[in-house]
Image: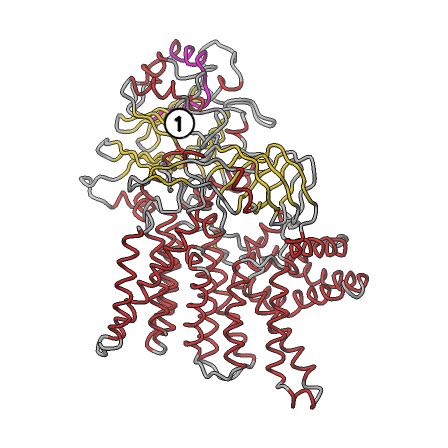
Amino acid sequence: MRIFALSFLAGCCGLWLQTQLISNTVQLLLATALIILFFSASYCCRVRMGIIGLAGCLAGVLWANWHASNQLQYRLPLSKERLSVELTGSVCSIPEISEHHASFLFCVDESASSRLPEFTEKQSSDRLHSKPLMPRKLLLSWYYPEQTVAQGQRWLLSLKVKSPYSNMVPGTFDFERWALTSGIDGTGYVGEASLLTSIDSRFSYDRLRVSLIEQLQQVVSSSDYSGWHLSLMVGYRSLLSEQQFDMLKQSGTAHLIAISGLHVGLVFLWSFWILSWLWRRSRRLCLWLPAHSFAMVMALVITTFFSLFAGFELPTQRALIALLILVLSRIFLVKWSSLSLLSLTIMALLVWQPLSVLQEGFWLSLSAISIIYWVAGGQSSRGLLFWVKLQLFLSLGMATLSAVLFGSFSLNAVLANLIAIPLVSFIILPLDLLAYVAIFVSPTLASLIIHLNDYFIAGLTHWLSFLNEQVKAVAVSQLMIMIIGILVLMSFFWFYFRQGFLALLLVVNGFVIVSFLIVSREPSLINTLDTNTSALNPINIKMPVLKVYFLDIGQGLSVVANWQDRWLVYDTGFANEAVNAAKSSLLPFLNYLGVKQLDWLIVSHNDADHIGGLPYLLQHMPVNQLILGEDSADQVGNCHTTAFKDKGVLLEWFSANTSENLSKIFSRNNASCLVKITVKDRSILLTGDIERVAEMRLLDQSPERLKANVVLMPHHGSKTSSSWSFVAQTGAEYAIASAAYLNRFNHPSDEVEQRYQTLQIKTYTTWRSGLITLIIDNSGALTLKQYRPLHKRFWNHSSISRI
């Protein structure tokens, strides 16, 4: 079982490396080989372990690929990416509602397929496949909803839907992978809507959960920590303020307010201890049924209901499966070792949801379970020393977890968790659960318990704030995460000689976590190191002198440039109340690169898709010099014609407004501050949103400044820009447009792209290429790399339809 379970896990992990799923023919061949291996294991005793391992690996590959293929077949083909359709279905999640926006999951009725158009898609095997499109679950956005959206409602919605798509920038959230593992078949926007029923009997669980949350909101409404209470009770985190979450994130304790295996396990333990103590008060009951058997079964039932009303997300499902296996082994008196229980748990988790290997949470949960088994297995007593040891190792694990999940390693995380985890486990969570029960008896009593608990939460938040002030969180680059992973592996490797399988599992977990970071966040480790090690290399080795990154940031613009220890950012992307490109893409990417400070931050002009992320970036990243193309609320535009050399790189910025004896005559797009970076006789020109009139002014003022090897298409490739004269004057090799997928402006314009291509200039767009990296080495050679094609996996959006 142990060898098969570990091999099955390794087979499922093959999904990380697959650019496309295994074809039906190959699956059939692998299934045949698997059957042969099973029969061979009975006869080949000398190599039986090897055969079992190989069979487990093949079984994992087949099982994971079948599930992934089954999930992807519901996604839209690309020929229908802007499909307008009317669908009936139900709201199957608690909507996230802001002032002008609502976001929710929409479960489509099976009967809705009659409303979908039929179409044909040509297969790679040249067969035609005709089938009505039938997505099961959609993630929808509704701007300015005219009615209140609630879980359990049934709607007839007019939608524009598309396949899950996300920007591809290393160090940022992979929405496409998350959509696959969450069963989301598409995303869309609501146009017209008609409410069919406010309560759907088929979603009575959803309605019951909504009613419970509404009751709890009334009870905690007067509390200063209502977000904490609802998070711990029912997994409803919408009331947590951004400041509260940032505090938890910085201190490495954000995991405490996300219901996971820790909370499920604590609910089980508390329920077991209380029920066992009560049952032992009666001799007759103990003679009828042992106290531990009754307490285990009932505690599992209580924990299941707790998980259901907490949303029954995958972390709680995994914890319930692990508890179920443990309970069954104890009730039926099966003498399984810790390693056998762990092996069976791994198999059960992967059979239940093999795609969970693509989730970071799965590996962290499995690592935590392994640590618990390790500590518990090596110590027979359960005294104070055991709990201290367990707490220490879990705290170290939570600190590493925060580094991996949130991109920041809290040096104070270990100390914070040493206090926070016991306080939450033995005081805050039990009191909230007691209030949870009391609400059905006396809301007044529940309110008193909540207010009592506020004192403990206040003490904890003061402690965490104090630690955050004393020791700041450290942004974790890929190199630092690699070092952390290697140290974790080394610290556990010695254990291999004491308990081989468990140590091997810990090593595999650590290896997969580190490998995941390399595979999914890279460009490569060398790219992180070469900036700081270029001085150590012989002059004849080609090393990057300048790197310029054009971020895939949606409908907006952000460019990062680096030479030696210098960092420049040009524009900060779009931001409004719902999204912030600096928060979701730019800052995580800078942290990924290990940037501690910006030397120059240049904002071309004041449009929201260029300046929107500025406040957030200034709040979280030190900046030496800020250059603005236009006046802002607290600073006058200072994009005056400037040119200087810095460590061998010529840096210039200028605008159509800057020339001798000429006042500012342009505003908005045409006031954009342009930046030109030159090294080794190679130049890159960043143009903001200038239009034809500003282009003509620049051609009159200083046409030589417009010559460049790489040019950023003005105004995202709009028809209002990139005049023939301007394009010809640049003499560029490459032209890059920063634009969003299916943007409403149709940027870049086909006409503009054709104009560049007519002049033998190769064109690239960020939504097609992902992050675009330009590298100029010490020989003057210019290299362009596209992140999406190089790092594409089978779950990523492609230019070729999947079905």
When the figure is inspected, residue 264 is found, relative to residue 586, above or below; the finding is below
Asked whether the viewer can see residue 276, the reply is yes
Q: Which residue is mark 1?
A: 737
The C terminus is located in which quarter? top left
Q: Is residue 553 left or right of residue 612?
A: left
When the figure is inspected, residue 492 is found, relative to residue 641, above or below; the finding is below
What residue is rendered at 53% in x and 55% in y? Answer: 471
Instruction: Identify the image's colour scheme: rainbow, by chain, secondary structure or one colour.
Output: secondary structure
- Residue 64 spot, x, y in % from top left: 38, 57
- Residue 262 spot, x, y in % from top left: 56, 66
Element on which disc 1 rests: strand
Displayed quadrant of residue 231: bottom right
When the figure is inspected, residue 421 is found, relative to residue 659, above or below; the finding is below
Asked whether the viewer can see residue 593, the reply is no
Write the start and end of the magenta stretch as one range.
684-699
Displayed quadrant of residue 260: bottom right
Observer-nearest of 786 and 397: 786
